[in-house]
Image (spheres, rainbow, N blue to C red):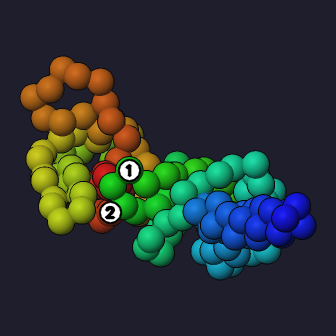
Amino acid sequence: MRPIRTILAAGAIAVTAPALAAGFHDLSSIDREVERFTGSPQGSRGGAQLPVDRRLKLTQCPTPIALEWYGSGNRTVLVRCPVSGGWRLFVPVAAAEATAAKAEPVISRGESVSIAIQGSGFTVSRQGEALEGGAVGEWIRVRPAGEKREAVRARVIQPGRVGIDLP
């Protein structure tokens, strides 16, 4: 009887280990997606500085992950699982060549802008004021019109329009 219990226990461990591992997102796939997004290999100029920390235990994302530039100067990639309650992480990028042309600003400080907040199945827009200038894809500070609250950060979508994506 003892050998049968040992075999059953070993079988149970063999079945549960992959099941536990299957519940987490493959971190090397994130590294590959960041490389594809930036167009540069990891560790080179314009690519991710380091691989995603292998100690992270991110839940499996049921949809394709979303990648976008975060901040100004294309120095960080925002990687997120675009579902309600999804995760997000920031991947630092190695500095690009100093000779790279800077994108032309399409929004100026003090300009009136439309702030679009987008979520799963909805978009809400309101007027606001740009507190910084920025080019398409850059993140700038904006303040909703008529509000005395603190500014929020939004990504420049096009001239006169900024956006905030909710998970």
Q: Amino acid at mark 1?
A: Gly
Q: x%, y% of residue 24? A: 61, 61
Q: Residue at x 76, y 67 (%)?
A: 8
Q: Nearer the viewer, residue 68 or 27?
A: 27
Q: Is residue 141 visible?
A: yes
In the image, taking residue 122 as reference, residue 34 lies left or right, namely: right
- Residue lying at the far top of the rendered structure: 148
Q: Is residue 38 visible?
A: no
What residue is disc 1 on? 85
Q: Residue at x 18, y 20 (%)?
A: 148
Q: Quadrant of residue 163?
A: bottom left
Q: x%, y% of residue 77? A: 59, 58
Q: Nearer the viewer, residue 23 or 82?
A: 23
Q: Are the residues tagged 1 and 2 within 8 Å (C-beta)?
A: no
Q: x%, y% of residue 164? A: 31, 51
What residue is disc 2 on? 157
